[in-house]
Amino acid sequence: MTARVTHGSRIGPIIAIAALLALAAAPWWTDRQGLRLLGEIYAYAALASLWNLLAGYAGLVTVGQQAFVGLGAYTLFGLALLAGVNPLWGIPAAGLIAAIAAVPVAALTFRLRGAYFAIGTWVVAEVFRLGAAQFSALGGGSGTSLPASVLAAIGNRAAREQLFYWLALALAAATILAILLLLRSRHGLALAAIRDNETAARANGIEVDRTRLAVFVIAAAGTAMIGALIFLQKLRISPDAAFSVNDWTALVIFIAVIGGIGRVEGPLLGTALFFLLRESLSQLGSLYLLVLGAVAIAVMLLAPRGLWGLLADRLGWQLFPLARRLEPRSSAPPVPAATTPAREASP
Amino acid sequence: MTSSADPILALAGIRKRFGAVVVADGIDLAVRHGEALGILGPNGAGKTTLFGMVTGNVRPDAGTVTFESRDVTALSPARRCRLGMARSFQVPQPFSGLTVFENLVTAAAFGAGEHESATYDRCAEILERCGLLPLANSRAGTLRLLDRKRLELARALATKPRLLLLDEVAGGLTERECETLVTLIRDLRNTGMTVVWIEHVLHALTAVADRVVVLHGGRLIAEGTATEVVRHPAVAEVYMGIPMDA
Ligand SMILES: Nc1ncnc2c1ncn2[C@@H]1O[C@H](COP(=O)(O)OP(=O)(O)O)[C@@H](O)[C@H]1O
Ligand SMILES: [Mg+2]
């Protein structure tokens, strides 16, 4: 028998490339404020995609990713202010430092399971925040700013804003593409296997702990690079802002939950919904947070697999199909076509 | 060096207890290359736990496990699988979010260390042999129990084992399905695979096993051909009043 294996529809890449081209041209169709908002959206799409990789695929439900956002931001500021490094180089450096830091963090927190792991990651992030507050060369607890002399190395204000915009878009696109490629590779199978049944994964030759560690390190690097870029755009850093559990974890989890955990498309839809809510409800003041909470609860009750999960279940939608479909070409009996499932967590 | 005279699997002085329950009380067992060994024993005797200690899911309190002349007692289950042993789980443990085909591809890519695209044909063939081809693209979590059991066997085969450990795969099969299974396992043996089979369905075991051991009270209380073993006085005593298929 000769097996032919396909991934199904090719609509996702076409939509993605079209969207990417349109967004890359944004400096020509929106103003500075629009670019800033879009940049923020990309950052959240990437952060939520990385959190989804951890929680939805590697089974690592962390509430401590702000540790790596902050570490990345502080790496960039530290290198720029103390060593005179061009801030743009601070972004890959942030990824590298976070990847290295992720190893001991994993060694510490991976002993914990479930809720204890979540709390452990939070505690580690708090320790990072307290450590940053002790760092007087970068302003201690009140933080510091990037002076104009450092920024001059990048270009004038207009050129900088455009560059930051494209960087945010490129970083988010690269993050999501990397996640897709990872999930489509054999390692994606391993992650799904671990998520579904750890015992069986081990019994079938998968090194569960090593795989989890690799994902944790990759996610830390991505998260830190995004964090570095976010604070490069803000030009100001402080421990409370850089290691904020609200901004870099609570909102990110909100996005992943309403969009759908365990699917690549979920965090993207979730990000779009979150910013729609935020932009249309911002005049409500603190009531807006109540609305967000109510939306999260409603989605969890009515669509426990998130809104993308609901769409995919009802309509069979899949932008980025991951499943390998077997289509034998020989005299073997045909494989029924209608049963292709999305790669998803079992209920 | 491994010579074929050495056993493929050797257990020496294996001990294991869960609290007051002793499930292995110094078990010694050697399985020859290419042999088909049956394991009998009442429910709760510790048969599944014994498999767990062979594959590394369960850590023995004492004793060693030797696979192909190599002490694997300290190795991880994943490592032992890659060395060439595979098991089916008595209670099926599918990768439920993956398709049936992907369950096999995963096992082949990691358990057998094959390049993913190089495994497709072999995985499709295994599915065909195990009667799962029509379900290849179904999510494993949607399978009914019998198909899940088939998947256990198919996925174990995808890891290309030289030692195959089967834990009650025949229970619940119809007469014809059981015959198909027996034929499949015989075919596997003819390719040189060593099979250790825990089974309550005695006639299936009789049709395949060269040798049967009986586990009870943490010890192997009888050994011989299937017919010899069931006539063994100690076995008769153990099974007196204890239904074989309970
Ligand atoms: N992880 C465990 N913790 C405690 N007791 C266990 C565990 N696994 C098995 N047992 C007990 O060990 C005994 C043997 O179980 P098992 O190996 O499943 O027997 P069998 O497969 O022969 O029916 C049973 O009494 C069972 O309850
Ligand atoms: Mg058992």
Image: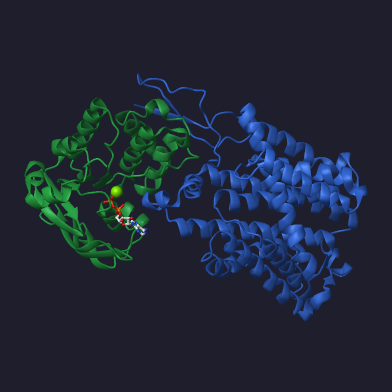
Chain colours: A blue, B green
Question: Residue at (54%, 38%) from the top-left corner?
Answer: A343
Looking at the image, is A152 positioned above or below residue A174?
A: below
In the shown orientation, is residue A244 left or right of residue B134? right
Quarter-of-image position of residue A306: top right
Q: Measuring from the top left, give residue B45's x and y in whole percent.
A: 24, 54
In the shown orientation, is residue B200 left or right of residue A102? left
Looking at the image, is A198 positioned above or below residue A7?
A: below
Quarter-of-image position of residue B129: top left
In the shown orientation, is residue A195 left or right of residue A289? left
Q: Residue furthest front?
A: B241
Q: Measuring from the top left, give residue A266's x and y in whole percent.
A: 66, 41
In the shown orientation, is residue A132 left or right of residue A159? left
In which quadrant will I find the N terminus of chain A?
top left
In which quadrant will I find the C terminus of chain A?
top right
Q: Measuring from the top left, give residue A260's x and y in whole percent.
A: 65, 42
Q: Is residue B110 visible?
A: yes
> Camera-side residue: A5 or A54?
A54
> Camera-side residue: A114 or B19?
B19
> Camera-side residue: B27 or A248?
B27
Q: Residue furthest right?
A: A283
Q: Measuring from the top left, give residue B58's x and y in whole percent.
A: 33, 59
Q: Is residue A172 visible?
A: no
